[in-house]
């Protein structure tokens, strides 16, 4: 049982790290507002899939990393990612039998909450209004959600098959 838990955690950390890299990947100026929230969407996916194993520790770690990469106050992304992880785990039971496309609605609400919190933090702490462009990433993240499900679902099944064999 231990190697499968480590395998799952290692894979989740690897995908979240790749998502963090994609989130800060430079884009052309005209396309930058549309950059998906890769890290948030990936965190939501893993918290939906394994709420007891993937959650607060990784949300806190990658929230701190996001704060450092974004140059924001320490804790802004941490609070947001931990809230997303908590709510994802909280509603896991109701989504357990849903397919990836049925999970797009709750994922969209969690992404919108994340962006609303960051928008409010920008207004309160930085006296900066990100404007309407801030919400473009929500739309692009929703378009990316099926891609994440297609990429991660086979690997998730492989992990679960390994778990049932041992």
Image (cartoon, rainbow, N blue to C red):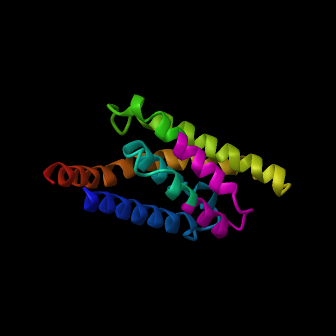
- Residue furthest left in the image: 165
The residue located at (35%, 62%) in the rendering is: 11
The image shows residue 60 at horizontal and vertical percentages of 57, 57
Residue 4 against residue 112 in the figure, above or below: below
Judge from the rendering whether residue 166 lies leftward or rightward of residue 109; answer left or right. Answer: left
The one of 58 and 46 positioned closer to us in this rendering: 58
The residue located at (48%, 52%) in the rendering is: 43
The residue located at (18%, 50%) in the rendering is: 161
The image shows residue 40 at horizontal and vertical percentages of 53, 52
- Range of the magenta residues? 61-86
Residue 11 against residue 152 in the figure, above or below: below
The residue located at (35%, 33%) in the rendering is: 96
- Residue furthest front in the image: 2
Q: Main secondary structure of the magenta part?
A: helix
Observer able to see residue 131 = no
Judge from the rendering whether residue 43 lies leftward or rightward of residue 115; answer left or right. Answer: left
């Amino acid at each position: 049982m231990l190697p499968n838990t480590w395998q799952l955690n290692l894979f989740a950390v690897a995908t979240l790290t790749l998502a963090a890299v994609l989130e800060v990947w430079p884009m052309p100026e005209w396309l930058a507002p549309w950059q998906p929230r890769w890290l948030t969407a990936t965190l939501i996916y893993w918290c939906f899939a394994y709420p007891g194993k993937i959650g607060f520790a990784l949300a806190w770690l990658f929230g701190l990393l996001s704060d450092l990469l974004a140059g924001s106050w320490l804790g802004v992304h941490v609070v947001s990612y931990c809230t997303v992880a908590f709510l994802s785990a909280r509603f896991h039971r109701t989504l357990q039998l849903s397919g990836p496309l049925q999970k797009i609605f709750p994922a969209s609400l969690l992404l919108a909450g994340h962006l609303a919190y960051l928008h409010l933090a920008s207004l309160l702490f930085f006296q900066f209004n990100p404007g309407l462009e801030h919400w473009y990433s929500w739309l692009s993240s929703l378009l990316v959600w099926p891609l994440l499900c297609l990429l991660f679902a086979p690997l998730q099944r492989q992990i679960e098959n390994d778990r049932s064999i041992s």
